[in-house]
Image (cartoon, rainbow, N blue to C red):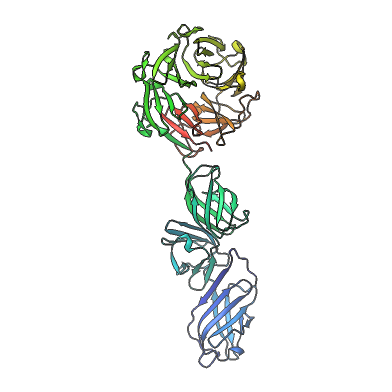
Amino acid sequence: MKKKLLFAVILSTIFFTCSKKDNPLGANANITQVDIEIGLNVDSITITGTGFTNYNQISGSINGVPISISPASSTTKIVAYVPAGTPTSGTITISSGGTPSTFPYDFNIGSESVTIGTTTITGSGGTLTLTGTFIGGLNGVTVTVNGMVFTITSSTSTQIIATNNTVTPSMLYGSQIKLGGVGQTISIGIPFVILNISPDSGVAGAQVKITGQGFSFNQSKDVVSFNGTPATIVSSTDASLTVTVPNGGTTGPVSISNGNSTFVGPVFTYPQQVSTFAGSSTAGAADGTGKNASFKSPENGVFDTKGNLFVADYGNNEIRKVDPQGVVTTFAGSTTAGFKDGNGTAARFSSPSGLAFDAQGNLYVSDELNNRIRKIDPQGNVTTIAGTGNAAYADGIGTLASFQRPIGIGIDNVGGNLYVADSRNNMIREINISTTAVTTIAGTSGFFGAQDGSGYLATFNSPRGICVYSMPGGQGVIIFIADYTNNKIRKLVQINNTVLVSTVGGDPSGKPGFTTSPPTFNSPNSVALGFAKDGVTPELFIADASNHAIRYVQGFDPVSSTPPSIVQTLAGTGTSGLTNGNYANAQFYFPDGVVFNPSDGNLYVIEFGNNDIRKIILQ
């Protein structure tokens, strides 16, 4: 009779060992065993014994339904075909004209629905998980693979888990798992195995090759998952699959399923999407590598062309340098606050908060509590280019101009101008690098608000971090501004002498929020332009400080006049903490700065609250 099979072939053998009975099979007949075998098209029983001298005259029945005796019978074995629909328990009756011999049978271990749920083979050991309906007791049950015994570690009426620490994947392909015990043996073929994954670590979007045996040429029949997250199969043969590492996956085993069986292979490792790049999380000023270094309320940062990250270490009054290997050194300043030009650590700052590089490798610093703009040349010489030091407002040349707590700073290398978010004056200032002339391009001193408009008509409320986009062909600049107290992201477009300010996102009334659409923020402190992992798609990143999260606008067009309708959360839960790992589980504590690194295509977060530098792998 036709059976539904979940593997290539499932054989079930039910056997009984019976004591010798008086029977009419022959003068010296002796039944030693009865097996019931479940096959593809017909089922049969095999009665083994001796003295079946009249086997060609034997008749029999199961539960009163006649069975057909096979010509393959002999004096030691009687083979009979089992009628379709035979129950899983009942009585078998055998007769050769004399007194019938009757005895019970019972499929007391399982049913034909038993399948391999998962086959986990890693390293030198493996685990089999068999699922099904085990309708009888499990005492005395054994699990073997090609004669190799697996130890049952747990069992229920629906699942058996068995292990063997010496089995390797290559031993399993094409083999039969036998589930046996008193009354029945079920044999299940293993249709495919995973032998190797190369590479065995990487980020989403990378391609890996899975080698093994028994894969399907039809890509729709095999399902590959990375720790439960489905992957896309790029190409396949019976011995290899090329797949794309899925986005959103986590470190864990790679598995292949054909709908009926699953083989669980080696572990694929995702690098931590969010990790600590440098800093111990305890406030300090120690140089060192990675977590052996320490910062004190770092505010923001910038990368040079060699992939070195320079950090405005606000609480330490220093400029720190972090190389691509995470080695932290002090580039300029000391832990003693002050104002002094000089070389390297002989110079003094007072709570530096913003940094920007020009094309010649000069580093510009918004020295917040000194109310000045400083310059550090490639040799580490610190000079002052603008600001009287008084907390005031005045345009003018160089040190004749005044600022009041300048924070954000950015540069237009095409036009040769610096731009400064003058936070307490609620203005955006421009500094011509060649002449050091300081002018105001947006906002009015003494006024705060959230008014969009041109130049002096626009208002801000504690503008902080900024990023500058130089328009193609030197047409002008676009400046994105983290308008901290307004809980908004603003956009300033300057073309020739025309300046227009608009709002990119944020609650219209300025209320703090943590929503995606319409986008709302809570004390955004920094913005950065960067690219998605493809290196082409532009994105705007936002350090949403009081939401303890990093937000972004995917596929962001800096030039477009249409504000984005959706701002997504890249990482952070909205609750303060220090947790590395996946985007969704990572926690931050007042992330004040966000910096895109064009050298490795990843994002770095300057954490004011956790005193560290975090790295976010973009994928």
Up the image or down, 142 lies above or below 419; here it is below
Up the image or down, 132 lies above or below 436; here it is below
Q: Residue at x 53, y 25 (%)?
A: 527
Which residue is at the far bottom?
A: 27
Quadrant containing the C terminus in the rendered view: top right
Q: Position of residue 416 (x, y in %)?
A: 53, 16
Q: Nearer the viewer, residue 537 or 434?
A: 434
What count of labels does the image hold?
A: 0
Q: Position of residue 571 (x, y in %)?
A: 51, 34
Q: Position of residue 612 (x, y in %)?
A: 41, 30
Query: Residue 566 lies in what quarter of the image?
Result: top right
Q: Is residue 508 visible?
A: no
Q: Position of residue 351 (x, y in %)?
A: 41, 18
Quadrant containing the N terminus in the rendered view: bottom right
Query: Residue 89 lies in what quarter of the image?
Result: bottom right
Q: Residue at x 65, y 70 (%)?
A: 2
Q: Nearer the viewer, residue 326 or 390?
A: 326
Query: Residue 70 lies in what quarter of the image?
Result: bottom right
Q: Nearer the viewer, residue 250 or 447?
A: 250
Q: Residue at x 57, y 84 (%)?
A: 78
Q: Is residue 543 visible?
A: yes
Q: Nearer the viewer, residue 371 or 525?
A: 371
Up the image or down, 169 lies above or below 403; here it is below
